[in-house]
Image: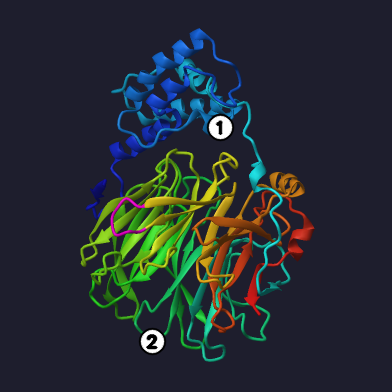
């Protein structure tokens, strides 16, 4: 078990540590599993570009220890087979550039050309994509009827997150699907069990990507908290904000900025973490290379204007955090949270709360490769034993494309850490998944959605790839895939809940079109949401 404690309350990351973090980025590019690489060097790696000669094997064996010494105590070691041979040159160039920018001079730096050859000699000529076993699934057989949510738009939909909440509105009581849409910057609500077909726009922000609900000012009205990423594409930007949509009591919302100048916020959660009776705000900012962190806005009570004031407390200085769902892991009444940390870290950690808002992190699971592509987690009881397991997807294809090992999996909670991983199914490009007993046979099934570049998606769909997949659980715990209808791999979000209150799980997916420059006018006609309700 690995643990570390973050105690600094400063929102600023120390400069030397920041440069160390840049050098760590280089480590994930060049660090390799030494034993595995030396063993594989004695034979031609499966799918490698060339059959290895004796001098090439000798180079791999000699460079391996240098690479290990250079990276020292860095994180998971990339496998040469994780990228095709023609991609490694730029990866190595970028890695060396990052190390030079760090200003460090205390390491013995291997020769750049040798490091490049080390990876390229063991890399495949190309990745086998799409994976043949993921093609031409049979149609899913579910007792659900599909419907669509469409609006007149000027830009294609960009739905990033779906939530199921009761806003406490008198005109439309009951739970609604709340969703963020970066296509037009909107935060919306729709009640799928009502005759109303037009969503209610709660606010217009910049690029909202995640939301939560809570009564932040303790006035009896439920507010909406939103992570506004500011800049979706990878950058060390400072355009992000954490926003409070303050319910005014007349079913409208006032936009209040809780924190700004943030680097690409990714998640926001409202809860009382320090046990003082008010609502604090947990914030994750994804950042990029030199920015990103997880911090807590500690509620210090309402001011004269009735609005709470906050003290910012740093919890984790690392970038790359995607999701931070809240859980009382030990059942002691203190709210902990689970963090999915991507980028070069590629790990899931539990942050245990001491009851006063101080956290200590413990490893739940670490990926075998820093290019694993972690993309989403959901806390859910997958095995029916009464505790929460972790449904987990790794399919981020934004930076380095889809990978043959992208998949849906779950981590089994038996009360001890780390957790044990169980494979559900391969799904290159998978972004998120949700679990429920969709076929009503008494166990948990999974619905997963994928997002790929349009040119890639078009080719894959022609070959039989499924953008939305139902993984039905069998009696032996294995999963059988089938396809749900969808045009392309244009989905980033999915949620399950009992929309029509018949005691059966329903589900919804959001459409996400990544617009860079011009777009196809037909995308304006595509639905924002696709909703499946049980019959």
- Which residue: 46% across, 29% down? 95
Between 428 and 280, the one lying in front of the other is 428
Quick one: label 2, few (<14), some, or many (20+) residues within 10 Å?
Answer: few
Label the magenta part by its dominant secondary structure.
loop
Between 532 and 298, the one lying in front of the other is 532
**Does residue 236 appear to the left or right of 146 in the view shown?**
left
- Which residue: 59% across, 56% down? 480
* Number of the label disc, if any, that sits on residue 83: 1
Image location (x, y in percent) of residue 237? 48, 48
**Does residue 420 appear to the left or right of 376 in the view shown?**
left
Quick one: label 1, few (<14), some, or many (20+) residues within 10 Å?
Answer: many
Q: Nearer the viewer, mark 1 or mark 2?
A: 1
Image location (x, y in percent) of residue 291? 40, 46
Tell me the element at label 1.
loop
Say above or below: 534 vs 118. Answer: below
Q: Quadrant of the C terminus?
A: bottom right
Which residue matches tag 2?
220
Magenta-span inclusion, residue 134: no
Q: Earlier in the sequence, mark 1 or mark 2?
A: 1
For the residues labelled 1 and 2, the Cα–Cα distance comes to 53 Å
Tell me the element at label 2.
loop
Instruction: Count every numbered label the image shows and give the total.
Output: 2
Answer yes or no: is residue 496 visible: yes
Image location (x, y in percent) of residue 108? 32, 19
Q: Which residues are magenta?
A: 413-419
Kindly give the residue lying farthest to the top in the view shown. Answer: 55
Image location (x, y in percent) of residue 32? 41, 28
């Amino acid at each position: 078990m690995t643990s570390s404690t973050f105690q600094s309350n400063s929102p600023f990351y120390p400069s030397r540590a920041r440069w160390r973090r840049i050098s760590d980025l280089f480590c994930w590019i060049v660090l390799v599993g030494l034993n595995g690489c030396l063993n594989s060097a004695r034979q031609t790696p499966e799918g490698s570009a060339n059959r290895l000669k004796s001098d090439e094997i000798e180079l791999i064996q000699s460079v391996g220890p240098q690479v290990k010494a250079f990276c020292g105590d860095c994180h998971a070691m990339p496998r040469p087979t994780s990228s095709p041979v023609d991609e490694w040159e730029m990866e190595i160039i970028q890695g060396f550039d990052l190390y030079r920018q760090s200003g460090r001079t205390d390491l013995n730096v291997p020769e750049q050309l040798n490091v490049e050859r080390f990876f390229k000699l063991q890399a495949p000529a190309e990745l086998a994509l799409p994976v043949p076993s993921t093609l031409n699934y049979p149609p899913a057989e579910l007792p659900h009827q599909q419907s669509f949510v469409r609006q007149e738009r000027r830009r294609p939909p960009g739905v990033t997150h779906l939530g199921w909440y009761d806003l406490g509105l008198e005109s439309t009581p009951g739970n609604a699907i709340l969703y963020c849409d970066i296509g037009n910057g909107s935060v919306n609500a729709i009640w799928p069990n009502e005759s109303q077909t037009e969503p209610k726009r709660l606010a217009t922000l910049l690029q909202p990507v995640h939301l939560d609900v809570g009564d932040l000012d303790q006035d009896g009205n439920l507010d909406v908290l939103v992570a506004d990423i500011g800049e979706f594409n990878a950058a060390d930007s400072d355009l992000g904000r954490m926003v409070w949509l303050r319910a005014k009591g007349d079913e409208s919302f006032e936009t209040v900025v809780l924190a700004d100048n943030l680097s690409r916020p990714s998640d926001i959660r409202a809860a009382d973490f320090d046990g003082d009776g008010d609502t604090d705000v947990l914030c994750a900012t994804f950042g990029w290379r030199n920015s990103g962190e997880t911090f807590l806005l500690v509620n210090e009570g309402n001011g004269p204007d009735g609005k709470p004031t906050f003290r910012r407390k740093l919890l984790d200085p690392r970038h790359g955090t995607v999701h931070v769902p809240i859980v009382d892991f030990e059942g002691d009444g203190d709210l902990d949270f689970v963090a999915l940390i991507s980028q070069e870290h590629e790990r899931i950690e539990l942050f245990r709360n001491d009851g006063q808002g101080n956290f200590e992190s413990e490893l739940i699971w670490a990926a075998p490769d820093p290019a694993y592509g972690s993309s989403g987690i959901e806390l859910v009881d997958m095995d029916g034993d009464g505790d929460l397991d972790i449904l987990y997807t790794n399919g981020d294809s934004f930076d380095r494309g889809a990978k043959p090992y992208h998949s849906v999996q779950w981590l089994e909670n038996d009360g001890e850490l780390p957790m044990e991983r169980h494979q559900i199914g391969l799904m290159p490009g998978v972004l998120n998944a949700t679990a429920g007993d969709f076929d009503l046979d008494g166990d948990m099934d999974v619905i997963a959605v994928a997002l790929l570049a349009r040119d890639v998606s078009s080719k894959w769909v022609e070959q039989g790839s499924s953008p939305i997949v139902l993984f039905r659980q069998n009696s032996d715990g294995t999963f059988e895939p089938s396809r749900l209808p969808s045009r392309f791999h244009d989905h980033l979000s999915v949620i399950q809940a009992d929309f029509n209150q018949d005691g059966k799980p329903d589900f919804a997916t959001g459409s996400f079109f990544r617009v860079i420059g011009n777009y196809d006018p037909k995308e304006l006609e595509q639905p924002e949401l696709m909703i499946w309700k049980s019959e």
